[in-house]
Amino acid sequence: MNADAPPPSGLGRILIADDEESFLRSLAVLLQREGYTCDCATNACEAIQRMEAETYDLLISDIRMPGNNDLALVRDCPARNAGIPVILATGYPSMPTALQAMQLPVLAYLVKPLDFEELLSHVRRGVAFRQVASTMAASTRLLETWVGDMKTLRATFQASPQATAQGTLHGALAMAMGNIAATLSDLQTLFKLSAGLDGGRSECAVQQCPRVSALEQAIQESIEVLEATKDSFQSRKLRDLRLKLEALARPEPAGMLGLPGLE
């Protein structure tokens, strides 16, 4: 299947950036089956070019890929596609990248192999956030236009009440009523879109990454063990802790998809 082909229904447009071709195309196929339009990029430079040419509702990006040093792609997103939410998917999770992600517009930090249902829930939430933001921006522009028109009408009416009364006022008020009706329609759309959000939870999805939680716990245990053994020259506890930290820091094997649903 062509990863750039339009979906059966337009739920949202997603850009997927990953230098692992099989993962890239497989994920695009699965998301297209859910009704999303998916464009693919194999490096950060190609992803930036696509964002300059298209408007996307969501970016799913690898961390270790050409041109993405220091999460350059995510840092460049505001200039190319303002407000786009980002999902990071990596086979090499680390505390530095997780902490960096928390300072950037990252919706979720996921570890490969991915659980597709978990990813899909983040995708739906991210697209909903994007659509809410876009609808709010459109409503704001509409209201600003309406306020500007009303100010102009008031100034004209005060300057020449007789001329304004000859039809201008009626037409301007009709246009204002139309703007108000359109704004109410936007508010109704926002209310429906809000159902796709996370119900008002404020916790950061990056902090829910199991690898990050494990590393944070290990750091806390390190402090406790070092405090308990500070007077010892040798300690079995310190050795066991070192082995545990080494195991946590060891990267996951590359090349695992873990994406169900492919035939």
Image: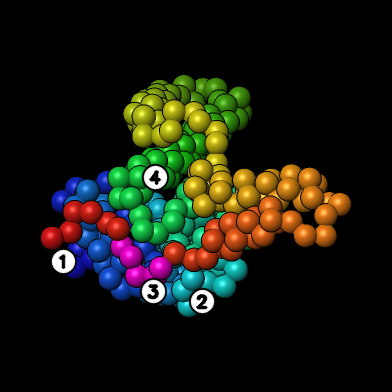
Q: Is residue 233 above or below residue 2?
A: above
- The kind of residue on which mark 2 rests is Gly
Secondary structure beneath dot 4 equals helix
**Residue 241 horizontal/vertical position (percent):** 65, 55
Tell me the distance, in whole angstroms, between the alpha carbons under discs 2 and 1: 27 Å
Q: What stretch of residues is rendered in magenta?
A: 253-257
Secondary structure beneath dot 1 equals loop
N-terminal label among 4 and 1: 1
Q: Mark 1 near mark 3, Cβ–Cβ under 8 Å? A: no
Secondary structure beneath dot 2 equals loop
Q: Is residue 3 above or below residue 197?
A: below
Q: Which mark is residue 19?
A: 3
Residue 214 appears in the picture as rendered: yes
- The kind of residue on which mark 3 rests is Asp
Tell me the distance, in whole angstroms, between the alpha carbons under discs 3 and 4: 21 Å
N-terminal label among 2 and 4: 2
Q: Provide the major secondary structure of the magenta segment.
A: loop
